[in-house]
Image: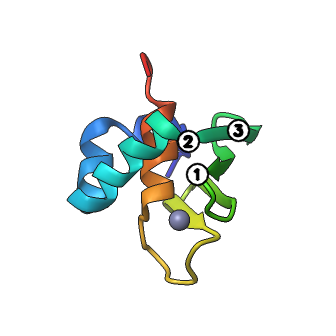
Amino acid sequence: MATIPILDLLTEKDVEKLASRSHLRFGKQIIKNGTITITNSNMFRRIAVVKYKNNPLQTVEFLSDNKGLHYKCSCTNKKHFFCEHCAAVALSLMPGK
Ligand SMILES: [Zn+2]
């Protein structure tokens, strides 16, 4: 299976499926009131640092490989947990945002 660019795996529909409604809502607030800094970026990998108010900085990583999309945030050890930071970074990557 070919590796698909991250942006093709993170459309608005995908993000709505991955994130719960409350995480989506919180993610949008982070975009509005916080800071997202992309520290590492190519077609298949994206790392961003999220700062929101006085909360600790969180690092979000998206990775696309031949097994599909992987995502990880420093705020949790849970696997396959699409938190508000993941939602914020994913939404901020979308064209036109
Ligand atoms: Zn998080």
Residues at marks 1 and 3, CA–CA distance in whole angstroms = 18 Å
Residue in the image at 57% along x and 51% along y: 52
Residues at marks 1 and 2, CA–CA distance in whole angstroms = 6 Å
For the residue labelled by badge 2, is the local secondary structure a helix, a strand or a loop? loop
| Residue 53: mark in rendering | 1
Residue 81, percent from left and from top: 42, 73
Please, is residue 45 above or below residue 86 in the view? above
For the residue labelled by badge 1, is the local secondary structure a helix, a strand or a loop? loop
| Residue 34: mark in rendering | 2
Residue 56, percent from left and from top: 67, 65
Sequence-wise, the earlier of marks 1 and 3 is 3
Q: What residue is pinned by disc 3?
A: 38
Q: Furthest residue to the front?
A: 54
> Dots 2 and 3: beta carbons under 8 Å?
no
Q: Furthest residue to the bottom?
A: 77
- Depth check, mark 2 against mark 3: the one in front is 2
